[in-house]
Amino acid sequence: MYYVNGLKYSLLSVSQIWDKGNKVEFLSKICTVTDLVTGEIVLVAKRYKNIYVADFESLQSCDLSCLKAIDDDAELWHRRLGHASFSLLNKLIQKDLVHGLPMSQFKTQTVCDACARGKHVKSFFKSKRDVSTSKPLELLHMDLCRPMRVQSRGGKRYIFVIVDDYSRFTWTLFLRIQKMKRLKYLWPL
């Protein structure tokens, strides 16, 4: 059985317990780990709500400590720290800013798939060579921009843009949206 010594909560791997030649038996209130060779109970865990809590202080003489995990994989730390650049990882190591980060220098690696996809730029719509409308005001494209952080001198924070598809004539209107009381009608009848 493996456990991480000094970790506040030790998570046990049942498959690794089996691989070490032990038997694991879960009952409604208790879990027992038995050595298959000697037949003695190595560990007992009592159920507390939805988890089994083991008392590691009462362990038998067998060695149940795990091997140290090798965490000097640069791509692993790149993913763990939100896809940070390798130069940033090296700076974090130099200044010892991250607890548990290995003290080895990471060499520049290739860009991971998630970073490559995240850096893609949206492709623009293809330009239309021919006009699809036959007269002005037949098709209008409209866009309302969200409130700007800084309002204009007139107190307006919204921009409403209208583009005529036929002539490409553009209207730009600056709007001030006021809180309205209760509306009786949405559209005039």
Image (cartoon, rainbow, N blue to C red):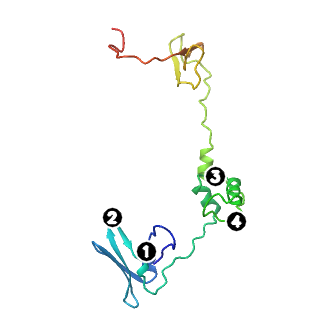
Q: Which of marks 3 and 4 is nearer the N terminus?
A: 3
Q: In this view, does 44 lie above or below 179?
A: below
Q: What distance separates the C-alpha of mark 3 from that of mark 4?
A: 16 Å
Q: Quadrant of the N terminus?
A: bottom left
Left or right position of 77 against 9:
right
Q: Which mark is residue 84?
A: 3
Q: Residue at x 48, y 67 (%)?
A: 8
Indicate the secondary structure of the residue bearing disc 3.
loop
Residue assigned mark 4 = 104
Q: Residue 15 carries which label?
A: 1
Q: Earlier in the sequence, mark 4 or mark 1?
A: 1
Q: Which of marks 4 and 2 is nearer the N terminus?
A: 2
Residue assigned mark 2 = 50
Q: What distance separates the C-alpha of mark 4 from that of mark 2?
A: 40 Å
Residue 158 % position (x, y)? 53, 20
Name the amino acid type tagged 2.
Asn
Q: Earlier in the sequence, mark 3 or mark 1?
A: 1
Q: What distance separates the C-alpha of mark 1 from that of mark 2?
A: 20 Å
Farthest left residue in view: 28
